[in-house]
Image: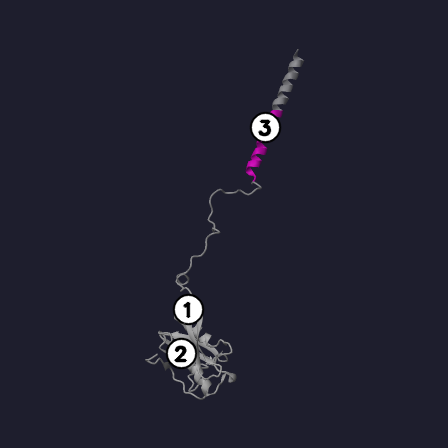
């Protein structure tokens, strides 16, 4: 009768030991998994600062206050085909300031017209045009092919004067050659430095 009892006890002990080993292994594996770092990155749910794709830089005061372009029709003076008198023509220009208006007007003097109207300024190179407190300064380069006789020189100056003095804010202009106040533009007529607006104009 003792043998079965001893066998049962032995089996019970083996079962208990096996269970204990299994629990220890499971606990160890669980500890190892808890202690080891995760292979996948942790994604935080906290809001992080980011740049919104819709965010655009605010315009600077200079940009926001830039004057809008205006369209206007002005008078520009050219020469007839015989180069005997000046001819008025209406030209549309776009400008944002008085400075730009003067530059557009002087630039328009150089535009070649149809056969009945010619530009005495077409071969003259305009280096710089500035407006300062009512005084216009124009610096030019005069190639040899742009030089004309006395009637042509007179038309160059007349067309410039009529074109500039149509603007009330222009009180005078000074025509420079290579940055210098030349005595004469083409050797026939004397230049005034500056040329003042006449009271009647």
Magenta range: 18-36
Q: Position of residue 164 (x, y in %)?
A: 40, 76
Is 25 left, or right, of 161 in this rendering? Answer: right
Of all residues shown, which one is farthest toward the left? 199
Q: Which residue is mark 1?
A: 72
Q: Main secondary structure of the magenta part?
A: helix
Asked if residue 159 can be seen in this view, the reply is yes
User: Which one is in front, 147 or 199?
Assistant: 199
Residue that carries the numbered disc 2 in the rendered image: 162
Quadrant in the picture for the N terminus: top right
Separation (CA) of disc 3 from disc 2: 109 Å
Q: Give the image location of residue 40, x and y in percent.
A: 57, 42
Q: Residues within 10 Å of mark 1 (few under 14, many from 20)?
A: few
Query: Sequence-wise, which precedes: disc 3 or disc 2?
Result: 3
Query: What residue appears at the point 39 percent right and 74 percent down from the top-left corner?
Result: 131
Closer-to-camera residue (25/54)? 54
Cα–Cα gap, marks 1 and 3: 95 Å
Q: Residue at x 61, y 25 (%)?
A: 19
Q: Quadrant of the C terminus?
A: bottom left
Question: Which mark, residue 23?
Answer: 3
Q: Secondary structure at mark 2?
A: helix
**Measured along the vertical axis of the image, is residue 23 above or below residue 5?**
below
The picture places residue 9, in percent across and down from the top left corner, at 63, 17
Question: Does the magenta portion include 70?
Answer: no
N-terminal of the two: label 1 or label 3? 3
- Report which quarter residue 130 is drawn in: bottom left
Q: Secondary structure at mark 3?
A: helix
Sequence-earlier tag: 2 or 1? 1
């Amino acid at each position: 009768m003792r043998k079965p009892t001893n066998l049962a006890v032995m089996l019970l002990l083996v079962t208990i030991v096996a269970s204990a080993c299994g629990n220890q292994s499971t606990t160890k594996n669980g500890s190892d998994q808890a202690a080891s770092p995760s292979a996948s990155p942790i994604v935080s749910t906290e809001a992080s600062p980011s740049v919104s794709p819709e965010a655009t830089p605010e315009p600077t005061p200079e940009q926001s206050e830039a004057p809008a372009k205006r369209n206007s029709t002005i008078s520009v003076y050219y020469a007839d085909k015989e180069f005997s008198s000046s001819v008025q023509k209406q030209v549309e220009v776009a400008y944002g300031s008085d400075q730009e208006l003067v530059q557009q007007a002087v630039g328009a003097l150089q535009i070649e017209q149809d056969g009945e109207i010619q530009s005495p300024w077409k071969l003259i190179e305009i280096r710089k045009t500035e407006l300062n407190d009512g005084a216009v300064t124009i610096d030019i380069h005069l190639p040899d092919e742009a030089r004309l006789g006395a009637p042509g020189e007179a038309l160059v100056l007349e067309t410039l004067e009529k074109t500039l003095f149509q603007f009330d804010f222009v009180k005078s202009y000074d025509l420079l050659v290579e940055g210098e106040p030349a005595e004469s533009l083409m050797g026939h007529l004397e230049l005034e430095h500056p040329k003042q607006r006449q009271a009647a104009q």
